[in-house]
């Protein structure tokens, strides 16, 4: 059974930085895509950043130039470096991992979430 455990959230002032980590229970090389999503109170969960097995990255427009996603296959861990944080970045951040299931089906795995709060 796949487990994803996030850490690194907390309270930070606007303009500050945090680094989130997502540790997987097994090899992350089995996942086609890993990523970070976030959900603010009263809003839908939204994509923040993704990284493929090959290292290609994708970012939401709202975080481009401020956030960086990376992966360490040896440590089975994905990171999200968040710089120049803004109050609107406040949300619960979730780690996600995807891999193929039966043809036509993608298996999604989620972590429990970590709270990021940015004060103004």
Image (cartoon, grey):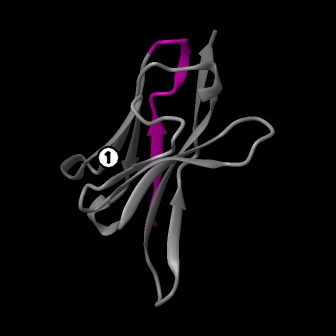
Q: Report the residue that reaches farthest toward the bottom.
A: 103
Where's the C terminus, which quadrant?
Answer: top right
Q: Secondary structure at mark 1?
A: strand
Residue 8 sits inside the magenta stretch: yes
Find residue 115 and report its horizontal and vertical position in percent.
60, 30
Q: Report the residue that reaches farthest toward the left.
A: 74
The stretch in magenta equals 1-16
Residue 70 as seen in the image, left or right of residue 104 = left
Q: Residue at x 46, y 13 (%)?
A: 16
Q: Residue at x 28, y 62 (%)?
A: 53
Q: Is residue 81 above or below residue 34?
A: above
Q: Is residue 120 above or below residue 30?
A: above
Residue 17 as seen in the image, left or right of residue 44 = left
Asked if residue 27 can be seen in this view, the reply is no
Asked if residue 14 can be seen in this view, the reply is yes
The image shows a total of numbered marks equal to 1
Find residue 114 and report its horizontal and vertical position in percent.
56, 35
Find residue 65 and report its horizontal and vertical position in percent.
39, 31
Find residue 38 and report its horizontal and vertical position in percent.
60, 42
Q: Residue at x 50, y 73 (%)?
A: 107
Residue 32 as seen in the image, left or right of residue 5 = left
Q: Identify the residue under disc 1.
A: 77
Q: Quadrant of residue 99?
A: bottom left
Q: Residue at x 18, y 50 (%)?
A: 74
Instruction: Please rate how many residues cluster around mark 1, counting C-alpha atoms within 10 Å: few if below 14, some from 14 to 19, many from 20.
Output: many
* Residue in the foreground of this view, choosing between 58 and 79: 58
Residue 21 sits inside the magenta stretch: no
């Amino acid at each position: 059974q796949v487990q994803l455990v996030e850490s690194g959230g907390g309270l930070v002032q606007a303009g500050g930085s945090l680094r989130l980590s997502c540790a997987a229970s097994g090899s992350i090389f089995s996942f086609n895509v890993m990523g970070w999503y976030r959900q603010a109170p009263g809003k839908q969960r939204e994509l923040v950043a993704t990284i493929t097995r090959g290292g290609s990255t994708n970012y939401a427009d709202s975080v481009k130039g401020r956030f960086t996603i990376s992966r360490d296959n040896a440590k089975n861990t994905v990171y999200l470096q968040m710089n120049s944080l803004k109050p609107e970045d406040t949300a619960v951040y979730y780690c996600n991992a995807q891999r193929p299931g039966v043809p036509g089906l993608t298996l999604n795995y989620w972590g429990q979430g970590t709270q990021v709060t940015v004060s103004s």
